[in-house]
Amino acid sequence: FPSHDIDFGQLGDGTYIDRDFPVKIGDNFVQISSGYSHTLAIKKDGTLWAWGAGGYGQLGDGTNENRNTPVRIGNGSNWVSIAAGAYHTLALRSDGTLWAWGRNDFGQLGDGTNINRNSPVQIGNANNWHSLYSGIPHAHSIAIKSDGTLWAWGRNEFGELGDGTTLNRNNPHHIVTG
């Protein structure tokens, strides 16, 4: 695992200085999620913001740059849920669509490839995603659709996808539970 004492601006306060006290980053945030060294947050108005390490595109701002202040991701204002993995990110929009970006060496984005993405890419065409989770440190993703079905993809070396195999999956895979 990478060293966690390297500062990539993940505090979002405009510096690269470690802090041992809380620092105000902004206002009107309603949800937050952080990976190893990147952070994402949704504001009350549904806009998505990111900061910290961006080397794998995990910020979603179209670059692979680190950011030490929040940067808005896209023009959308319909983001409702986020889940930051170690180096990748999943997000839901209010229309029920699922989006992903960042590191993708095990298929953890679910877009059918193993290509890193530095901006949000829609995963499939389903519009009934309900909740999501990005695995740390094992580069996997899990989501639930509004019908209650469970889906998983990404790294599966230790059976973390729950499908009875150790095969990596680069698309959402329906997990049947008994």
Image (cartoon, rainbow, N blue to C red):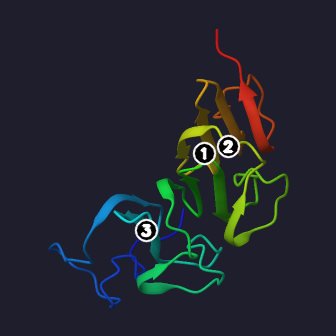
Of circles 1 and 3, which is in front?
Answer: 1
Label 3 sits on a secondary structure element that is strand
Q: Secondary structure at mark 2?
A: loop
The first of marks 2 and 1 along the sequence is 1
Residue at figure coordinates x 84%, y 52% from the top left: 112
Q: On the rendered image, what quadrant is the C terminus found in?
A: top right
Q: Amino acid at mark 2?
A: Asn
Q: Which residue is mark 1?
A: 96
Q: Is residue 159 above or below residue 132?
A: above
Marks 2/1: CA–CA distance = 4 Å
Query: In this image, 142 relative to 31: left or right?
Result: right
Residue at x-position 75% and y-position 68% = 116
Q: Which residue is mark 2?
A: 127
Q: Mark 2 and mark 1 in contact? Answer it, CB < 8 Å.
A: yes
Identify the element where label 1 is drawn. loop
Q: Name the kind of residue labelled 3 in the image.
A: Thr
Q: Is residue 107 left or right of residue 79?
A: right
Measure how far apart labels 1 and 3 are at the Cα level.
Answer: 22 Å
The mark nearer the N terminus, 3 or 2, is: 3
**Would you say the residues marked 3 and 2 are in contact, meaning their CB atoms lie under 8 Å apart?**
no
